[in-house]
Image: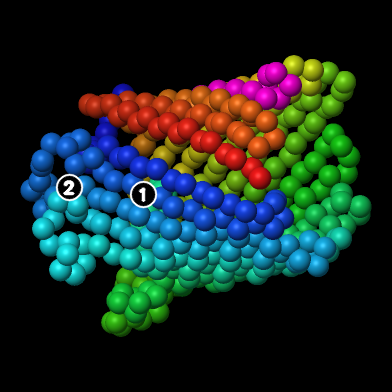
């Protein structure tokens, strides 16, 4: 039985283009990026959501960005920068665009990273800031109004057979001090990777993520104040066989996650446990450059209010032709979803890719993705295609 009660919001057709011009090489480069995109105003009927008092208006976006990477001191110290400024028009049909009504917003974002790499260890600092009003049609999803600081450390022992990695982060919102509350996030991560032989390896990872709130414009009521701890443990074994003709890899990943809500009022609604399991096999035929990888994925979540189960296989195949100049790939995923013992949706996702390397400077890539979802009383189709040309100096 399939069931769905979620309303579907109409979506405009969207058109746009992007240009990237860069100078430098793989270690030291500087790129300029420009994007221009807009909704096609007549692509959906003129409607108004009377229930939620919403109008669906066509939008437009222009963005300018830069990307840079600079390696210094024999590439031991690397500095990276990614920054952009976006102008976003929320209603292109409005007659009030020229009188400063806030229909056009300008915002910026920056991400920078500084990493020092030695023979057996590395240290890194990462900073990211996204302004509250930042939007871009070139990004499918982004969480704005955030500032994040992070530290990273990694160590290699026993001639690379043992790897250790640690990270710490702090993040908060309310950058313009206009929210009722400031939400803080702090996290710790530790991982160990053991590879005693070429055939066998196993990795362990643990992380915790704490969310807590402070007052912003107003005092926070204790019954609604956020105070949660998310803990995750992952175990990932693998077994690899390599011979003169094939490379075989059997792998698995088992993840257990637990959310503890320390607010006594909300804990009965938010406390949950999740188990995510993936088991797969990958085969590569060396002579023909053919790869084949089937897998099965299971996701189970239980709370005091509901049980959710997603299960389904994934199959991918890829092959290179003509001395590596042409690359083809195909991937298909089927997912069946069940909530509270009722199967409510089925989704098929297929992606076809084609790449052609003309020479050492010119590359063409074409990717097409189709997602088809069946609900109880409706269906949903989503198609996405992109053609990319890349010139390397």
Closer-to-camera residue (230/195):
195
Mark 2 and mark 1: Cα distance apart in space = 20 Å
- Magenta segment, which residues? 320-332
Question: Which marked residue is nearer to the observer: mark 2 or mark 1?
Answer: 1
The picture quadrant where one finds residue 85 is bottom left
Q: How is the image coloured?
A: rainbow
Above or below: residue 186 compared with residue 204: below
Pinpoint residue 324: horizontal percent, then vertical percent.
71, 25
Tell me the quarter of the image containing the C terminus: top right
Q: Is residue 82 above or below residue 100?
A: above
The N terminus lies in quadrant: top left
Residue at 13% from the left image edge and 56% from the top image edge: 94
Q: Secondary structure at mark 1?
A: strand
Q: Residue at x 65, y 56 (%)?
A: 29
Q: Provide the residue designation for mark 2.
A: 56
Q: Which mark is residue 36?
A: 1
Image coords of residue 386 (percent x, y): 45, 34
Quarter residue 105 falls in: bottom left
Residue 187, position as x, y percentages in the image = 57, 66
Residue placed most toward the observer, 52 or 139: 139
């Amino acid at each position: 039985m399939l069931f769905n009660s979620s309303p579907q919001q109409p979506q405009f057709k969207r058109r746009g283009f992007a240009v990237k011009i860069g100078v430098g090489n793989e270690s030291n480069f500087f790129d300029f990026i420009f994007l221009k995109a807009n909704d096609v105003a007549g692509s959906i009927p003129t409607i108004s959501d009377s229930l939620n008092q919403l109008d669906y208006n066509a939008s437009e976006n222009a963005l300018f960005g830069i990307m840079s990477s600079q390696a210094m001191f024999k590439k031991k110290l690397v500095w990276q920068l990614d920054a952009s400024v976006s102008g976003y028009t929320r209603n292109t049909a409005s007659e009030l665009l020229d009188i400063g009504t806030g229909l056009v917003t300008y915002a910026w974002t920056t991400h920078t990273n500084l990493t020092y790499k030695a023979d057996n260890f590395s240290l890194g600092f990462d900073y990211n800031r996204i302004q509250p009003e930042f939007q871009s049609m070139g990004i499918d999803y982004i969480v704005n109004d955030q500032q994040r600081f992070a530290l990273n450390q990694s160590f290699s022992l026993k001639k690379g057979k043992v790897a250790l990695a640690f990270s710490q982060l702090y993040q908060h919102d309310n950058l313009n001090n206009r929210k009722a509350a400031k939400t803080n996030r702090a996290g710790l991560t530790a991982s160990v990777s053991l590879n005693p032989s070429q055939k066998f390896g196993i990795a362990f990872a643990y992380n915790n993520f704490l969310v807590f709130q402070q007052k912003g414009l107003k005092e926070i009521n204790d019954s609604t104040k956020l105070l949660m701890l998310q803990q995750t443990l992952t175990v990932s074994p693998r077994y690899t066989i390599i011979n003169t003709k094939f490379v075989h890899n059997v792998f698995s990943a088992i993840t257990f996650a637990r959310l503890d809500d320390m607010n006594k009022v909300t804990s009965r609604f938010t406390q949950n446990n999740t188990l995510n399991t993936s088991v797969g096999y990958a085969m590569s035929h060396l002579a023909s450059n053919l790869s084949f990888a089937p897998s099965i994925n299971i996701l189970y979540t239980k709370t005091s209010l509901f049980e959710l189960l997603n299960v389904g296989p994934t199959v991918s195949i890829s092959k290179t032709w003509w001395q590596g100049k042409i690359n083809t790939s195909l991937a298909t995923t089927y997912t069946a979803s069940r909530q509270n013992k009722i199967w409510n949706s089925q989704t098929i996702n297929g992606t076809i890719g084609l790449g052609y390397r003309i020479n050492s400077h010119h590359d063409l890539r074409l990717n097409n993705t189709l997602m088809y979802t069946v609900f109880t009383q409706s269906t949903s189709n989503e198609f996405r295609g992109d053609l990319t040309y890349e010139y390397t100096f």
